[in-house]
Amino acid sequence: MLKRIPKLKSGVIPSSKDFNALVDRVNGMSNIVGRGGITVKQSNQGVSINPIGSRPPLRLYKIQSLGTGDGIYTCHHVTVGATDWAAVTLTDKYVKVNEVDTDVWNLDENYRDGQELSLGDYLQSWQVSDDEGNKRWVGRRANLGVGWIRWFKLSSGSTVPLVGKRQTCNAGSFSDAAGAESEYIYSQPQIDKTHYFTDDVVAAVFVGNCWVALYNQPVPFDVCT
């Protein structure tokens, strides 16, 4: 613990010892070092003490289209809208900041199938530098609590497992998602195949390394309205 320097008394001329104690204390500020996740920077303005590795500012991005490669999406910057902040109905609280196309990498897609995102999904993102010093936006899906739920239109409703293509919901109807390919969906129970027909749309969740149908019947036609 530092020893307190006594205050000068009125009418008493301070000795060199008193002055040197003050000088030593001031000079000792230059010996401050950072430990335990703390950095120390000194300048003519004083001493700045900051935590190491503080989290960079976050941004919200909305996916507009597939980007330049696996897991990279073309997005627009969005934020929270003040007008609908207190809305109690099913209101979209996001508002667009700009329409500048920005590539954002979904970290969960690195060598992993099934974590692909869809148009309209949101990414919680932050900026990093790659190994050549380029600024890149990376992130993870902002609405993770919903789970990896997707819609699939079946190309065959009588196979085990089911076969279908991923769908997006636009203007009240389903359509093939960009780049969608045929995928397997396991239904519960799989042995009962009478619930499904060709062109049925089923909801599925990604479990482990495969898609599993959530219900034993197709989703209602009005789910996309």
Image (tube, rainbow, N blue to C red):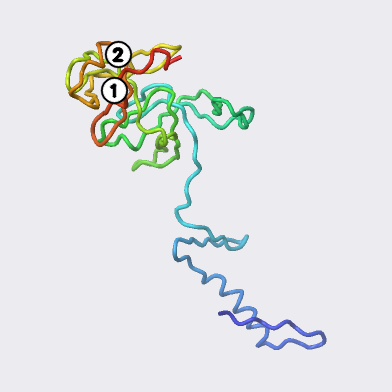
Q: Secondary structure at mark 2?
A: loop
Q: Secondary structure at mark 1?
A: loop
**Front position in the image: 170 or 102:** 170
Q: Is residue 91 left or right of residue 152?
A: right
Tell me the kind of residue under disc 2: Asp
Where does the image place residue 175, in percent across and percent down from the top left?
35, 13
Q: Is residue 157 left or right of residue 122?
A: left
Decide which of tag 2 and tag 1 comes sooner along the chain: 2
Residue on which disc 2 sits: 200
**Residue that appears at 23% across and 34% down:** 209
**Residue that appears at 45% across and 12% down:** 171
Q: Which mark is residue 196?
A: none
Residue on which disc 1 sits: 216
Tell me the kind of residue under disc 1: Asn
Residue furthest right as drawn: 11
**Figure quadrant of the N terminus:** bottom right
**Front position in the image: 80 or 12:** 80
Give how far apart the Cα atoms at labels 2 and 1 are.
12 Å
Q: Quadrant of residue 21?
A: bottom right
Q: Is residue 41 left or right of residue 26?
A: left
